[in-house]
Image (cartoon, grey):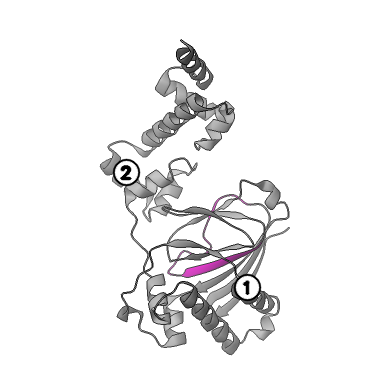
């Protein structure tokens, strides 16, 4: 499967997008401005990682996301992605929804208690997905009136499914990300094999600001602190089960067995295999 993108715009902004792609590496969400997004997965399975959430999307599970940074990740079940990934996104922007509904979003203080949410694809959403697929495959049908109608239908569906008091309240809340603490973001993503650049992106910080903030919060450099926490977690796993050392290295977020071994020896003074053996001997003694 080759990369393919089909886009329908409204007022110059992409609002409906179908992406077809082969297997992929971790990637930042497609647009990084002020948009909120709903995403269907037509084919395959993808993981979604944000400051405090991680879940998987497939044909039966969709996602509603506020306007914040998050990553798409390959599914750990490669059998679900052999034919590639196909997704359909609905993108909303404050300027577009204010034009569509003549709302002043600043007049509502309503809030939703999530930044990302996994949504069951029920019959109504399935029918909606099919209708957007038809538009994307036949863009000549997608004049401004049709696009406006489909966007309004989507907002009505979401307002009801999320039990918001009104469409205005739902939309206003959708453009107000919940604040997630720096420490919470780090703790939720310690074992995810994220680079420092990617962690900084999740925190909505530049790399230099991220390193400075990390030092203030944890009194250590990100590289040292994260490596130590991963090794400590690995040590617990080595004592508790019979997983292969290479599997444990991957589970705690190391890119390679060599890097894992080097960091483990630096902290415990022995290799993971030697450490496991010494713990087994201690328990027997």
Residue position marked by numbered label 2 in the rendering: 214
Q: At which x and y percent is residue 276?
A: 50, 19
Q: At which x and y percent is residue 43?
A: 68, 61
* Disc 2 from disc 1: Cα separation: 45 Å
Asked if residue 81 can be seen in this view, the reply is no
Q: Residue 47 carries which label?
A: none
The tag earlier along the polypeptide, 2 or 1, is 1
Residue position marked by numbered label 1 in the rendering: 123
In the rendered image, the vertical position of residue 242 relative to residue 89, given as above or below: above
Picture quarter with the N terminus:
bottom right
Q: Does the magenta stretch include residue 11?
A: no
Residue 1 vs residue 47: left or right? right
> Which residue is painted at 55% across and 50% down in the image?
26
- For the image shown, how many numbered marks are present on the structure? 2
The extreme top residue here reads 285
- Does the residue at mark 2 contact the one at mark 1 (Cβ under 8 Å)? no
In the rendered image, the vertical position of residue 99 relative to residue 194, given as above or below: below
Q: At which x and y percent is residue 221?
A: 34, 37
The extreme front residue here reads 284
Q: At which x and y percent is residue 225?
A: 36, 35
Nearer the observer, disc 2 or disc 1? 1
Q: Is mark 2 on a helix, strand or loop?
A: helix
Q: Does the magenta stretch include residue 38?
A: yes
In the rendered image, the vertical position of residue 214 relative to residue 52, given as above or below: above
User: What's the magenta region?
Assistant: 24-42
- Dividing the picture into quarters, in which one does residue 41 lie? bottom right
Q: What element carries label 1?
A: helix
Foreground: 48 or 93? 48
> Which residue is painted at 53% across and 32% down in the image?
249
Judge the density around disc 2: few (<14), some (14-19), many (≥20) Cα neighbours within 10 Å.
Answer: some
> Which residue is painted at 59% across and 67% down in the image?
121
> Which residue is painted at 49% across and 43% down in the image?
192
């Amino acid at each position: 499967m080759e990369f393919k993108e089909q886009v329908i715009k409204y007022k110059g902004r992409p609002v409906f997008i179908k992406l077809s792609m082969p297997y992929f590496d971790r990637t930042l969400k497609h647009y990084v401005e002020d948009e909120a997004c709903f995403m269907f997965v037509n084919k395959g399975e993808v993981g979604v990682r944000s400051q405090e959430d991680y879940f998987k999307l497939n044909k039966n599970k969709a996602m509603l996301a506020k306007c914040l940074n998050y990553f798409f990740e390959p599914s750990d079940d490669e059998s679900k992605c052999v034919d590639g990934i196909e997704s359909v996104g609905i993108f909303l922007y404050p300027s577009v929804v204010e034009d569509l509904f003549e709302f002043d979003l600043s007049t509502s203080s309503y809030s939703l208690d999530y930044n990302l949410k996994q949504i069951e694809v029920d019959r109504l959403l399935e029918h909606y997905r099919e209708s957007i697929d038809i538009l994307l495959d036949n863009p000549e049908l997608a004049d401004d009136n049709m696009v406006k109608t489909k966007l309004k239908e989507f907002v009505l569906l979401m307002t009801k499914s999320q039990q918001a008091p009104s469409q205005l309240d739902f939309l206003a809340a959708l453009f107000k990300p919940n604040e997630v603490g720096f420490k919470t973001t780090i703790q939720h993503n310690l074992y995810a094999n994220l680079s420092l650049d990617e962690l900084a992106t999740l925190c909505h910080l530049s790399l230099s600001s991220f390193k400075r903030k990390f030092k203030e919060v944890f009194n250590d450099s990100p590289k040292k602190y994260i490596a130590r926490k991963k090794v400590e977690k690995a040590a617990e796993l080595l004592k508790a089960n019979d997983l292969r050392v290479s599997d444990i290295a991957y589970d705690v977020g190391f890119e390679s067995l060599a890097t894992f071994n080097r960091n483990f020896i630096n902290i415990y003074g022995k290799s993971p295999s030697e450490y496991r053996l010494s713990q087994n001997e201690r328990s027997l003694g």
